[in-house]
Amino acid sequence: MSFASQGFAAEARIKDLVEFDGVRGNELVGYGLVVGLNGTGDGLRNSPFTEEALVNLLERLGINVTGEQFRPKNVAAVLVTATLPPFARAGGQIDVTVSAIGDSKSLLGGTLIMTPLNAADGNVYAVAQGSIIAGGASVSGDAASVTKGVPTAGVIPSGARVEREVEFTLNDMKTIRLALRNPDFTTADRIETSINRAFGKPVARMLDSGTVSLDVKASGVRSPAHLISALENIEITPAQKARVVVDQRSGTIVLGSDVRISRVAISQGNLTLRVKEEPIVVEPNPFSQNGDTVVVPRTTVDLQTDPGKGLAMVDDAVSLPEVIEGLNALGVSPQDMIDILKAIKAAGALHAEFVVQ
């Protein structure tokens, strides 16, 4: 079981709490071919799109293979993804991720052939090519196979070169908006107050729980870039909602420092049901002419109830350490602990947002 708690809110820099308007990355995607695999490529009969792409590639290189019968096992079709960072300039290099889309067994040792990467607008912003670094391994024989990690996906560090720049001029902006990653009115107000205090005049204005607007001209700074540089390291104490997050798969429970529980009684017990089958074989009487051997079923049912720890009383406005101590004192399993928290929330005694993953 993993049981954790969020500590009291510490100071954080504004750059770690917000996104600056216009300063963002752009997702890129492309379709390409990986060659040089050691017999672990796509089966061309099962992946006809790989064969079609390979034929088109060879024809562009001046090799006519129309009508030819070839079934190479060292080629795989892949999707190539990357993120074009903000202010990326032509000629710069970015990392790419390569993922097989056919029935290839592994991309280990493969080389990605020149692949254009498109953005949402359909334009090509980068071109990827290079040797793939895959983090898995796959070994197979006639009767068994072993796979460790994911050998059908890999990365190419600095594997794409930027060919087109995103048209965005930061210096032309008159107003800069800060978008909070976790919208909260209290946090937005603290950001506004801290920025205005740092500049000694009203530069920032809170628009809503997720947006703070900056007036570049009122700040007196010579450019928007210098304004962002001046304020992004200002530290504030962000406000957090009371929240309980549980992951039923791993048994992880995380409670925020502001979680409170009203007076409530908790009882937890287990019901154990055992069913045991002991069939009996009944033989016919000696010298019986028409007798048959019959199997007579016999079932034993045992029902036991574990009384658990009885009722546990939780007083008003319990703090987070007391909640953890009380739940651990019940000696329950992670799944039972999650069920108890659900029941407390349903009873209206858990004053926090309850998130189940």
Image: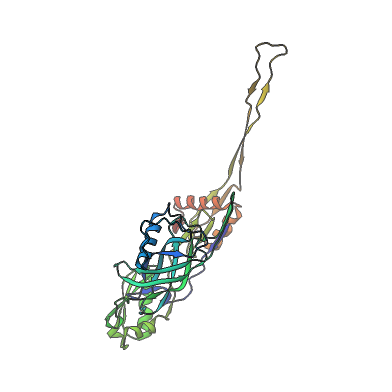
Residue 75 pos. (x, y %): 45, 61
Question: Which residue occupies the extreme right position in the image?
Answer: 286
Residue 102 percent location from the top left of the image? 43, 56
Residue 357 is left or right of residue 283, and the answer is left
The residue nearer to you, when weighing 147 against 303, is 147
- Asked whether, in this view, residue 180 is left or right of residue 106, the answer is left
From the viewer's perspective, is residue 340 above or below residue 292? below
Q: Quadrant of residue 119?
A: bottom left
Camera-side residue of 323 and 251: 251
Quadrant for the N terminus in the image: bottom right
Q: Residue at x 64, y 23 (%)?
A: 295
* Residue name at image x 44 percent, y 52 percent: 348
291 up-or-down from 302: above or below: above
Numbered marks: total: 0
Q: Position of residue 159 (x, y in %)?
A: 44, 73
Indicate how the structure is coloured in the image: rainbow
Position of residue 113 relative to residue 289, above or below, is below
Q: In the figure, is residue 111 to the left or right of 210? A: right
In the image shown, does 276 or 263 lie closer to the viewer? Answer: 276
Report x, y in % for residue 81: 40, 66
